[in-house]
Image (spheres, helix red, strand yellow):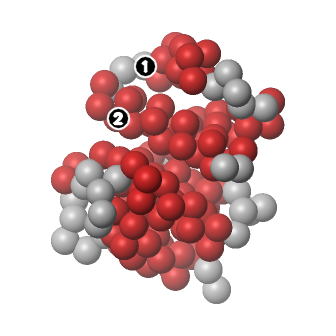
Amino acid sequence: MGDRRKSRELALQALFALDLNKTDPRPEMDDFLEQHGEDLSKPSRLFFQTLVEGVLENCEKIDALLAQSARNWKIFRMPAVDRNIMRIAVFEMLNLSDIPSSVSINEAVEIGKKFGTRDSGPFINGVLDRIRAQYEP
């Protein structure tokens, strides 16, 4: 598994916990990284932090895009794992120009297959592909 994949998976776990607990994320992120990030390289830790902080700072905009692109699904009704995987991918697609959208989507689908349900992969792919179509020429 690549370093960025590891960072994405840890970001998913951290965002999932924050999503369910609705607490102040700063102290929790430090504890989370201390407990689970021991094998992350310095660049991987920075990527993890970029993802988590970026999703948290842009969550309203990201959720609006997800709601608009997820046909017949409200954000709060989506499985929490799928919701947070897609939040990470949308943040990457909108803010990290060094990562092609196709890579962000593929990573999200693969992580969805690992952590979500059997329907997660196709659901994540469909929603993210609609968002990509809106933002790519």
Q: How far apart are marks 1 and 2 (CA)?
A: 11 Å
**Residue 87 image point, x, y percent:** 46, 52
**Residue 51 image point, x, y percent:** 60, 42
Amino acid of disc 1: Asp
Amino acid of disc 2: Asp
Q: Would you identify the image quadrant in which residue 124 lies?
A: bottom left
Which residue appears at 34% of the width and 53% of the height?
Answer: 116
- The kind of secondary structure element at disc 1 is loop
59 above or below 127? above
Left or right of 91, for residue 75: left
Left or right of 3, for residue 67: left
Q: Would you identify the image quadrant in which residue 39 lies?
A: top right
Which residue appears at 70% of the width and 57% of the height?
Answer: 96
Is residue 116 among the parts visible in the rendering? yes
Evaluate if marks 1 and 2 touch, with contact meaning CB atoms under 8 Å apart.
no
Residue on which disc 2 sits: 19
Which residue appears at 71% of the width and 31% of the height?
Answer: 40
Which numbered marker is on residue 72? Answer: none
Reading the chain from its start, which is encountered first: label 1 or label 2? 2
Which residue appears at 43% of the width and 72% of the height?
Answer: 125
Quarter occupied by the C terminus:
bottom right
Q: Would you identify the image quadrant in which residue 63 lies?
A: bottom left
93 above or below 37? below
- The kind of secondary structure element at disc 2 is helix
Residue on which disc 1 sits: 24
At label 2, counting other C-alpha atoms closer than 10 Å, the crowd grade (few under 14, some 14-19, many 20 or more) is some
